[in-house]
Image (cartoon, helix red, strand yellow):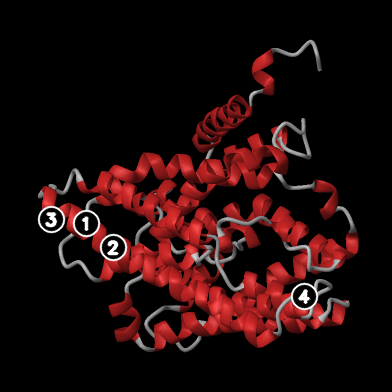
Amino acid sequence: MSTLPLFFFSPLAIIGAGLLLSQMFGVLLHRRGVPRLYGAVAAGLILGVSGFGLVDAALLTYFQELLNAASALVLFEAGRKMDLAWLWRSRAQGLSLVLGCLLRGACTVALLVPFGVGWSDAAFIASILIAINPVVFTSMVADHNATGVATYAAANAVGLSHLVALVALSVSLAWLRSHGVTDELPFGDQLLHQGGKLLLGAAIALLCYGVYKLASSVSRAEAGVRPGILLATLMLDLGLCSVTSSSALLSLLLMGLLLRNAEKRENVFQAQLKTVQDIGYALLFMTSAALVQLEQVLHWQILLMALLVFAMRIAVTRLALVPGQAWSTHKKHAIALSACSLVSFSALVVDSSMSNAAYLSDTATRLMGALLALNVLVAPAITWAGLHFAGETHEGSEK
């Protein structure tokens, strides 16, 4: 190690090298019809714990705020894609998306308990697996310029799944902490504590949205300038959530929701933020891939359990879409495939990591590791396949 150049020991240089490899591999793969996100997967596996070990959990602690900022953009975008008016008007379609969230959670518990996972651990994992990964879905949509009814429905499902997952996670987290080895506060007090975080996060979102509106009004900012004001407001939101230990996920989702549903004029943020968001997608997925331990997917029992859970999520999501009469059978298959990706504990709480969930059993922790490994390796391809199957990608529209 003493013969290596000094820049290899700079955390910032290592992250920069990872992003450089992600972009380079992504462009090369995209030319061959492979989703660009796999460039971040390749870079993460090469530099991460399954490769050279340069990017690990210890190094990423130096960049927690940077990762939080990238997560803020992703969560904001997920909230901005939710059309509350459409969800209400469509009724059957909106209920189908909610039903999909509930079935993903309930069926995960029903599947894991017979494998020997405890009820508390199964409920905790199930609450996480309700959510659909916004990085995977949004990146695939952006890369292939996907538009259409299936893409629109899946985009609404992403944001909606996070809201439902957040409520379920608060309850399961309160139960785990109140019945864990540390024996902290009773369940009722823990539930009030988690609920308080949600309320405070919502209050911060309303405050920051008001700040954004005031700043835009006072400065008389034109449409092309507003993205800069928005970015500053999102960082303010994230910072306030961090210092108050409130729910950053709910707060950032609500910021996106308010911008989409409270403002009547057409927003132009997507074009101005696209480059920043693309870098954020690559950074988040590269770090996720860097933490993947490939040996976890080699244990056949854990791998079998993870594969069954992964396939079950797709199947029950498809089942939940049956009441949605506005979608054809073909589109329903496509929506279910596009919503296959899952998130980690860290993505749901933004400012924590899976290692902080010490109250999980060894089996549950290994299962989550195997699921996240599968998610990194196969979810981008399945999501792309779903969009392509719907005929809503740019390539599909040209044919």
* Drawn side of residue 296 relative to residue 149, left or right: right
Please name the residue that numbered disc 2 is placed on: 209
Quote the CA–CA distance across marks 1 and 2.
15 Å
Please name the residue that numbered disc 1 is placed on: 267
Please name the residue that numbered disc 3 is placed on: 217
Residue appearing at x 81%, y 71% in the figure = 182
The location of residue 134, given as percent across then percent down, is 50, 59
Amino acid carrying label 4: it is Asp
Please name the residue that numbered disc 4 is placed on: 121
Q: Above or below — where is 318 with respect to 280? A: below
Could you tell me which quadrant the N terminus lies in?
top right
Quote the CA–CA distance across marks 3 and 2.
12 Å
Quote the CA–CA distance across marks 4 and 3.
48 Å
Amino acid carrying label 2: it is Tyr
The location of residue 392, given as percent across then percent down, is 39, 59
Amino acid carrying label 1: it is Asn
Q: Residues within 10 Å of mark 2 (few under 14, many from 20)?
A: many
* Drawn side of residue 260 relative to residue 239, left or right: left
The location of residue 375, given as percent across then percent down, is 66, 56
